[in-house]
Amino acid sequence: MTNYRRATVPGATYFFTVNLADRETTLLVDHIDDLRNAVRYARTRHPFTIDAMVVLPEHVHAIWTLPRDDADYPLRWRLIKTWFSRRIPRGERRRDSRIAKGERAIWQRRYWEHLIRDDEDFHRHVDYVHFNPVKHGQADTASNWRYSSFHRYVAEGRLSRDWGVGVGSDGAFGERG
């Protein structure tokens, strides 16, 4: 088995992409309350800050900052995936390998993580998170997608409600705050 190396820096900020196994489903938005409760469950046991997050029908993007002495984001994702999966009715198609391991087939086994390197990297990933529903055709503007930390950023005055509207071909976003 391949030994994947992940960045593990205590107290760091990370960007994640976590996908469902079936990329044609709308399971995450259909069961948004279960997903929110799964995140709350993980946060009460192993705290972390959600800097930005968006939930699309079949994948999640998140930016988290971990406590100063902690780098165990795999544990947190495992708790979220497990909690969520236990609340979803069975019925998904499973390959023999998943059946042999007693696994559900809701989530892809692996996920993407990226260690945020500096403020510019952070802001670029926050923009990516908030613009993702528009990119995937789920909404015409970031403000029209309900399942996003974009609304918190607007309420806090960090982004304007019309942020991202009319993004040019150069990919430049509107002014912050």
Image: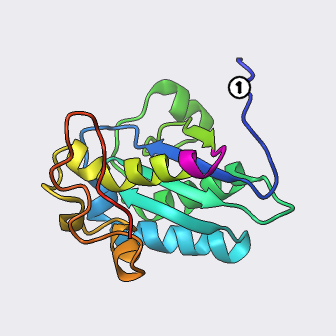
For the point 33% across and 60% down, the residue is: 175
Amino acid found under the numbered disc labelled 1 = Tyr
Q: Quick one: label 1, few (<14), some, or many (20+) residues within 10 Å?
A: few
Q: In this picture, is 60 found above or below 146?
A: above
In the image, is 153 to the left or to the right of 16?
Answer: left
For the point 46% across and 46% down, the residue is: 124
Q: Position of residue 73 (x, y in %)?
A: 69, 53
Is there any visible trace of residue 63 in the rendered image? yes
Quarter of the view holding residue 32: bottom left
- Total marks drawn? 1
Q: Secondary structure at mark 1?
A: loop
Is there any visible trace of residue 79 in the rendered image? no
Assign the N terminus to one quadrant of the image.
top right
Quarter of the view holding residue 83: bottom right
Relative depth, front residue between 40 and 150: 150
61 inside magenta stretch: no
Relative depth, front residue between 117 and 64: 117
Q: Position of residue 170 (x, y in %)?
A: 26, 34
In the image, is 22 to the left or to the right of 18?
Answer: left
Magenta range is 116-121
Q: In this picture, is 30 found above or below 122?
A: below
Question: Residue at label 1?
Answer: 4
120 inside magenta stretch: yes
Assign the C terminus to one quadrant of the image.
bottom left
Farthest residue toward the front?
175
For the point 15% across and 50% down, the residue is: 166
Relative depth, front residue between 99 and 149: 149
For the point 78% across and 43% down, the residue is: 8
Relative depth, front residue between 85 and 76: 76
Farthest residue toward the right?
69
Q: In this picture, is 55 found above or below 177?
A: above
Q: Position of residue 156 (x, y in %)?
A: 42, 81
